[in-house]
Amino acid sequence: MTIVLIRSFILYLVVMFSVRLMGKRQLGELQPAELVVTILISNIATLALEDIEIPLLHGILPILALVCYEVIASWISLKSVRFRRWISGSPKILIRNGIIDQEMMKTLRFSVDDLMAALRMGGVFYLEDVQFAIVETNGSVSVYQKSACQPAEKQDLQAFQPSIDPPQTIIADGHLREKSLSAIGQDRTWLDNILHQEKISIQDIFIFTADKSCAYHLIPKGANAS
Amino acid sequence: MNRCKVSIWILLSLILLCFFSLAEIQKQCREYLVIIDNIQNAVDSGNTEQALADFAMLESQWKAYHEINGIFVNGSELDSIREIMSGLQPLIAGKHPEVNSELHKMRELITAVYEEELPEIWHIL
């Protein structure tokens, strides 16, 4: 039992390290090769966890090797378009200029229901509104609506406003984040002045956000967010 | 790029580890096989004392290498060898005719441990 406990901890560390080594791309969207590696890792880790007759090294070695292959393959695919197409495939156009490519749908084994569901997930409910629908290499469908159906943007209304960076979390659960403070171009003196005005200390703040224009939002501990 | 470098280093380390494990298992297996041959010769010539002394050497060698073996070799394979080894001493001491078949079995198992590690196409497939 103790051995299983220790082995599971070691494998946990190895799998965590492996996932970190694969990078954030891995966590957000799975390319075909990444999906294969993820499934294989989970299976190998399970085998080494369950059977203590198998040396731990026989579990760790293939996990690390698979992750290394994946990282090296993704690096090569960055350098070579041909390799990238071979590993990940290429995006396929399902709807071009408002016309459904039925042959492509057959090739991708995409049913009409799949297409309609993908369009709805893209926020489009009328097929005739779609100019382009593209199946990406990770299987998701990108939808581009016809110009007349696209929502109006500020620039269409000529209501221009300068772009403002999003607010930073300066204090979270009573802890100051110095980096966020410097990211909005302010220093501790500015923060101390605000805290003095609000008659509150850092330890008593649940969340404090501010942007570069010095507009801030403060929620004390124990208070409901407004 | 950093991830790629780390991956290449890890891969190289793993390859080195594989070579080391192969060399280590080969070395150990050869030593075991030499001792088993010595036991066999002593048994054939009726020298029980020599056979027991060689067996004691085999046992101490096994104990010394056991931890390293456990890292690289599947536990069930080691268990089979250990099982034969545990019954070998009384057979040698009693000049039992089964000694020969047990020694042969042990030799085959030890050879298999080494040979299965060799990166040959029929082992890979």
Image (tube, coloured by chain):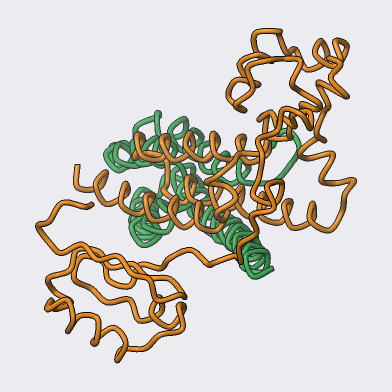
Chain colours: A orange, B green
Q: Position of residue B91 (x, y in %)?
A: 32, 36
Q: Is residue A54 visible?
A: yes
Rendered position, A183 above or below A25: below
Residue A187 vs B77, above or below: the answer is: below
Left/right of residue A160 with respect to residue A187 in the rendered view: right
Q: Quadrant of residue A97?
A: top right
Counting the numbered discs, the total is 0
A46, B112: nearer the viewer: A46
Q: Is residue B123 visible?
A: no
Which residue is depicted at the point 88% across and 11% down?
A103
Vertical comparison of B90 with B71: above or below: above
Q: Residue furthest bottom?
A: A189
Quarter of the image where one finds residue A219: bottom left
Q: Quadrant of residue A33?
A: top right
Q: Position of residue B99 (x, y in %)?
A: 40, 34
Residue A66 x %, y %: 61, 47
Q: Quadrant of the N terminus of chain A?
A: top left
Q: Nearer the viewer, residue B37 or B27?
A: B27
Q: Residue furthest front?
A: A158
User: Which residue is found at the position 55% from the left and 58% from the top?
Assistant: A21
Image side of residue B44 versus residue B88, left or right: right
